[in-house]
């Protein structure tokens, strides 16, 4: 799945890429999920705790109500029986829950056998189902004092702000707000940063390869923004290299193809064997040149596409010995190597050797009599240098010589890709390449690699 598709999916986008609800819709979804999780955890935890401590709580409630029932019994027993209904009404007016006087037989069906036996013995009975009622038989009578329903509390003369219901509402409101406020600002910032990244991805998809994601504030999204910018830079670099390569290759093959077409026409018209041999040699030379161009172009494109490059420790002495075997310039041209102070470098052997071969080839091509290859460690860098005693590189052209298919002096065997490959190899290793004046009087091409 592409980066743009992932961002669109995170936003809940339609097929046209537009957000369906914006950050508020995202907030509502996350809010409901968090509230449900909190509710499940809290309700489940409370339920489990009440299940474990239920009997202790029941005993505690019965102990609290035992004194209340005792006082009520004393009041009834000290009042004539005919005045009990009036007393019941008076007591109900002063209690926060209903007070009733019931016939004992009317409770038989609503109580368990164990509760019925306790009621007959004059003990306090709390209804087992919801603990909303308590009963106790008046001694020596068939009447029972019933208190409850305790959930139907009658409050008189108490300010609304002191009611338990209001307390519960305020606590629940604070609970929901405590979840909503931090979650909203977190989701908003998260959505805002992702929106910036999605806009950047849309711009890149539309072909705006110079588009970059702005700096984001969410730490969770910030690495994604840096990764997106790095990816966009690499894509832009690869596409630009491919564009330059395609244009340059098309330009470079035009001349050999024209010569080959003209040579074929001349070959068909030629009658003498010597003339045919000369034309055949020209055609073969052009074919070799095209093969050489294709090989260098493929190498340049392959190295340019590399995101990471495998490295290993390379013995400098062995590397220089291999290069010395490859290049054996004829006198008076001299090629020397110096690197005794650096034992090894960490790099890709194939890529490093390719870069040095190109630098040495370039030096031998432009030197008068001497090319010197050396390596030294400067701080946290290994610096490879190729010096020659040629005419050097003009200061105004020192950046341009590293561009693909650039030749300051046309050479029949060159295409201007050698130094471009040197710079690509250096950059893939995390280093750089440049050119300056050489102590030998010509040019010094410098190739830097991280020492670590």
Image (spheres, rainbow, N blue to C red):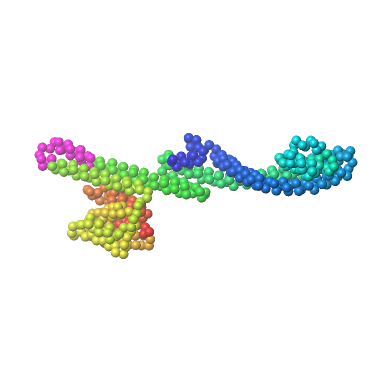
Labels in figure, total = 0
Q: Which segment is the magenta one?
A: 256-276
Q: Is residue 385 left or right of residue 67?
A: left
Q: Please tell me which residue is depicted at 75% across the width and 43% down the height of the picture.
A: 126
Q: Which is nearer the eye, 2 or 199?
A: 2
Image quadrant holding the N terminus, namely top left
Q: Please tell me which residue is depicted at 32% across the width and 54% down the height of the picture.
A: 348
Q: Which is nearer the eye, 450 or 276?
A: 450
Q: Does the magenta stretch include residue 275?
A: yes
In the picture as drawn, the residue positioned furthest to the bottom comes out as 341
Q: In which quarter of the image is residue 276?
A: top left
Image quadrant holding the C terminus, namely bottom left
Q: Which is nearer the eye, 435 or 226?
A: 226
Where residue 176 appears, x then y in whole percent? Answer: 63, 44
Where residue 45 appears, x then y in whole percent? Answer: 63, 46
Q: Does the magenta stretch include residue 107?
A: no
Q: Please tell me which residue is depicted at 23% across the width and 55% down the height of the picture.
A: 326
Q: In which quarter of the image is residue 249?
A: top left
Where residue 204 appears, x then y in whole percent? Answer: 43, 42
Q: Is residue 180 visible?
A: no
Q: Quadrant of residue 342?
A: bottom left
Where residue 316 appears, x then y in whole percent? Answer: 29, 60
Q: Is residue 34 visible?
A: yes
Q: Is residue 87 left or right of residue 107?
A: right
Q: In this view, does 18 lie to the left or right of 79?
A: left
Q: Magenta residues: mostly which secondary structure?
A: helix
Q: Please tell me which residue is depicted at 36% across the width and 59% down the height of the picture.
A: 451
């Amino acid at each position: 799945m592409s980066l743009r598709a992932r961002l669109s999916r995170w936003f809940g986008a339609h097929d046209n890429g537009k957000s369906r609800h914006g950050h508020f819709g995202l907030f509502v979804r996350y809010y409901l999920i968090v509230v449900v999780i909190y509710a499940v955890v809290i309700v489940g935890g409370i339920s489990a705790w009440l299940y474990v401590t239920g009997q202790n709580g029941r005993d505690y409630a019965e102990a609290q109500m035992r004194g209340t029932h005792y006082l009520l019994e004393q009041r009834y027993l000290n009042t004539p029986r005919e005045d009990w209904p009036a007393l019941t009404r008076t007591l109900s007016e002063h209690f926060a829950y209903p007070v009733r006087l019931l016939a004992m037989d009317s409770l038989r069906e609503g109580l368990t056998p164990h509760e019925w036996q306790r009621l007959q013995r004059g003990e306090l009975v709390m209804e087992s189902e919801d603990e909303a009622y308590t009963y106790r038989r008046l001694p020596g009578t068939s009447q029972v004092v019933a208190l409850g329903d305790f959930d139907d509390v009658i409050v008189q003369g108490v300010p609304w702000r002191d009611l338990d219901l209001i307390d519960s509402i305020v606590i629940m409101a604070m609970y929901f707000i405590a979840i909503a406020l931090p979650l909203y600002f977190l989701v908003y910032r998260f959505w805002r940063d992702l929106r910036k990244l999605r806009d950047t991805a849309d711009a890149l998809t539309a072909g705006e390869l110079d588009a970059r994601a702005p700096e984001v504030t969410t730490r969770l999204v910030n690495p994604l923004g840096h990764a997106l910018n790095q990816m966009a830079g690499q894509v832009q670099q690869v596409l630009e290299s491919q564009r330059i390569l395609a244009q340059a290759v098309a330009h470079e093959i035009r001349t050999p193809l024209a010569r080959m077409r003209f040579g074929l026409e001349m070959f068909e018209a030629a009658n003498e064997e010597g003339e045919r041999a000369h034309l055949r040699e020209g055609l073969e030379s052009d074919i070799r040149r095209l093969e050489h161009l294709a090989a260098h172009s493929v190498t340049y494109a392959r190295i340019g596409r590399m995101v990471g490059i495998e490295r290993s420790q390379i013995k400098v002495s062995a590397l220089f010995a291999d290069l010395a075997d490859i290049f054996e310039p004829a006198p008076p041209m001299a090629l020397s190597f110096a690197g005794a102070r650096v034992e090894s470098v960490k790099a890709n052997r194939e890529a490093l050797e390719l870069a040095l071969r190109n630098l040495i080839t370039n030096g031998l091509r432009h030197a008068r009599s001497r090319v010197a290859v050396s390596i030294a460690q400067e701080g946290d860098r290994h610096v490879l240098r190729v010096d020659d005693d040629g005419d050097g590189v003009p200061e105004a052209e020192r950046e341009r010589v590293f561009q693909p298919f650039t030749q300051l002096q046309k050479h029949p065997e060159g295409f201007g890709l050698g130094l471009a490959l040197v710079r690509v190899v250096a950059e893939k290793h995390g280093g750089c390449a440049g050119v300056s004046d050489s102590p030998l009087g010509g040019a010094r091409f410098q190739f830097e690699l991280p020492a670590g």
